[in-house]
Amino acid sequence: MSQQSPYPFLSLWMKKTKPSHPLIEMIKADTQSGGSDSNTRAVLMAYDSVIETLEAAQPLRLDGERTEFQKAQTHGDLRIVRAELVAGAKLARAAVTFEFGRRNGAPQPDLILCQRNLAIEVKTRRLDGLGDLYGELEAALADIHAPVVVHVICDERPLEIKAADRARLVEQTIQRVLRGEHGTVEVSVQQPWTARKRLLIAVQIIETAAPPTGRRVVTSTGGTLSGHFQDLEKKVLEVLNEDQKRQQAMSIPTILLVEASQTGLAWMRPQQTWATRLASQLPESTPFRGVGVMISSLDSPDVSLSIGVHPNISLADASAIQGLAKDLGLSGP
């Protein structure tokens, strides 16, 4: 008799995936370790719980979401469909009747709330300039087996660092290491699209007795985050102007939810603050009735979210959003 999978619903969805699916290696590692890695097991169990909830609810067009999940080839692909699945599961747990939107034909939002004349469009964003620089510099230092640790210090945590700027910083640092240089060099990176306009980065090279066996790069930032959160708000609100999103919002009263758990430090801000800040900046011309931030964790089947409501919407739309917020247990802005 074969042993039952610890995540049976996920296992069923994995049956038609290709060997390149992002979860294949994780499942293999979990199986080989017997579940001894609690973090890996928690991630897989979270997927299983989300899928179990949706399979019990059986919203219309769930098969389309299952297909998109099975087609995922990168972690980016998987993040997009996971955000939709997690949002759907949250609705299902709150007994909110919904269906997934059509993927072909006339544009529809991701989640249609059948009894409320309301819909939710989910957008996944990933922006982590410092994290990207960390990963690229770590890989470059590992390639040359240098006996150094590099400390990267930013005056404020950047939401973005353009690829060309990161490449230049990595190349400059590697050349310094190869020349045997130590100490600190400061670099100014122009970022005219941000609140601060300019990013100051200090790169310190510290000699070690032997090539480190663990992390070669350490990052830190200044204490202020005001510019970082201004940039975050700007990036969330930019989604309102995407043509496809606007078309979807014009087909039915729609709330935009931006999944931002991997967008800078969005997760640090209280959801009620997000709702208040976004509501105050919604443009008059947007077809969206509201916008919010959704924060999820890979090891949890749930998601936290907020809804900033447009101040000039109809009483019917306001009532529908208030009813949804009550069902989901959300506090108002």
Image: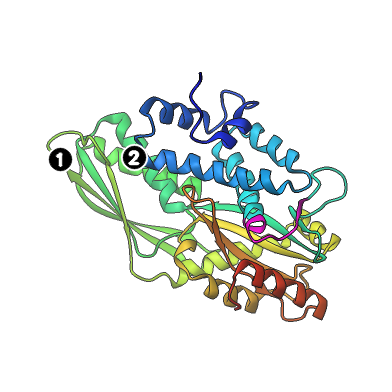
Query: Is residue 196 in view from this perspective?
Result: no
Farthest-out residue, front: 1
74 with respect to 105 (left or right): left
Between 206 and 312, the one lying in front of the other is: 312
Residue linked to disc 1: 208
Q: Quote the CA–CA distance across marks 1 and 2.
A: 15 Å
278 with respect to 127 (left or right): right
Residue linked to disc 2: 138
Three-letter amino acid code at the position of disc 1: Thr
Span of residues in magenta: 90-100
Q: Residue at x 59, y 71 (%)?
A: 330
* Among the two numbered marks 1 and 2 on one chain, the one whose residue lies closer to the N terminus: 2
**Quick one: label 1, few (<14), some, or many (20+) residues within 10 Å?**
few
**Quick one: label 2, few (<14), some, or many (20+) residues within 10 Å?**
some
The quadrant of the picture occupied by the C terminus is bottom right
At mark 1, the secondary structure is: loop
Q: Residue at x 83, y 42 (%)?
A: 104
Residue 310: x %, y % from top left: 71, 76
Q: Please say if 266 is above or below 34.
A: below
Residue 69: x %, y % from top left: 64, 37
